[in-house]
Amino acid sequence: MNNFFHFSERDTFYKQETMAGITTFLSVAYILVVNPLVLSQSGMDKGAVFTATALTAIIGTLLIGLLANYPITIAPSMGLNSFFTFSVTIGMGIEWPVALTGVFIAGIIFMILSLMKIREKIINVIPKDLKHAVASGIGFFIAFIGLKNAGIIVSDSDTFVTIGNLTSPMTALAVLGLILTVFMLVRGVNGGIFYGMVITTIIGMVAGAINIPSSFVGKIPSLEPTFGVVFSYLNQSFSAELVAVIFTFLFVAFFDTAGALIALTSQAGIMKDNRIPNAGRALLADSSAGVMGAILGTSTPATSVESSAGIAVGGRTGFTSVVIAACFAIALFFSPVLSVITTEVTAPALIIVGSLMAKQISNINWGKLEVVIPAFMTIIMMPLTSSVATGIAFGFILYPLSLVAQKRFKEVHPIMYVLCLLFVLYFVFIA
């Protein structure tokens, strides 16, 4: 096991990897509660989606851990499940089985692109400065999500966002958790993020802010309402709307995953010489999870940025992913306990991890204007639009245009010109 996961090479050990896996699971476990809630609004069975969510996370996370040796989890994407429900099924009026078939087709295309190493090639030609911008931008985005989940910042009609009510019980609990976690981290306590979440949960239950679950073990819901439904709809003729939906799933998931992989492998110290080792295997794991997720009954999964919480604790190998998958498997039987893992409990971890990831900003060459503007727009647009793909789009459009303006045509890889054009067309399309 030690040799298989290269523990010595990556300077890690079992306890550290196990702690990292549990920390990542606690950070992403909310998806087991939220994903069924979101997709059920499209008409899907909530229980079946819960089971499909857990099984998809288990399959995807095991694949990326065993094939690519990454300390990363793959789980249904929050952004894409909202797009599936509110834009596709409710907005366009497309029935959920047909929309799920679109997810399945997008997953198949993903697998083909991964096997042909097209996705890996695209990631490797991204300029180093833009990769650092993507990594730090995701850090700001994660911190923003954490602050929002904690209620520390809230929406405002005049200023868009403003500070929330810090005296409300759950927000105060999140603030206390943040202070405790920061205290432990600066004191050098190993696993401070994990311990912070556990202590915060206990304080919340003692104070009555978090309900103590009435039971601990629950029956695993049946997959029957959603399993294999996509095969019944594959022969149906697809409308232009559904083709557009497939394209959107494909496009957004592609760059969400690319951005997350760049950020997470950079944080874990896996990226070497501007290249991600085993990127092809990681992308194949991601796309395979997409196909299996659609068959089981959930919207598109993606590489979860919450994996950064476990990496911050010390996760460096695929053994972390094995632990995460084991936690998801156990969670299938303990669904009532998941109610205590609220967004306020995990918010401090996201805020701190976002802060740590934002350190990548120091690696950007801020002395060159043609780098500064695309990098800054990549970073700032992620939290402002709540989309990793949109942030990447702004940077990938502005970077080649900036070099073209300086008549440095040959310094831009041809693939970057293609991506620039595709992102322009993407913005025209979504408009």
Image: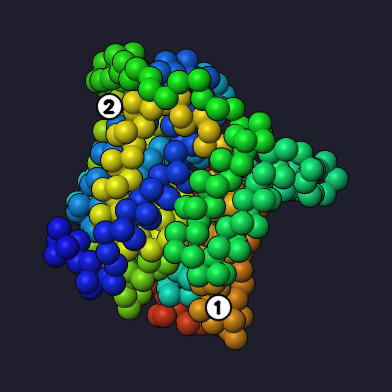
Q: Which corner quadrant holds the N terminus? A: bottom left
Give coordinates of residue 419: x percent, y percent.
43, 59
Q: Is residue 374 visible?
A: no
Q: Is residue 324 visible?
A: yes
Task: Examine the rendered structure and indicate whether residue 317 appears above or below residue 28.
Answer: below
Amino acid type, mark 2: Ile
Q: Position of residue 26 (x, y in %)?
A: 45, 44
What count of labels does the image hold? 2
**Residue 249 coordinates in the image, percent (x, y):** 42, 39
Which of pointers 2 and 1 lies earlier in the amino acid sequence? 2
Q: Quadrant of residue 10?
A: bottom left
Callout 2–callout 1 Cβ contact below 8 Å: no
Q: Secondary structure at mark 1?
A: helix
User: Residue placed at 46% from the left, 29% from the top?
Assistant: 337
Q: Which mark is residue 295?
A: 2
- Residue 362 circle label: 1
Residue type (three-letter) at the residue carrying disc 1: Ser
Residue 199 position (above or below residue 372): above
Q: Nearer the viewer, residue 141 or 412?
A: 141
Colour treatment of the image: rainbow
Which residue is at the front of the view, 40 or 255? 40
136 to 214, vertically: above or below: below
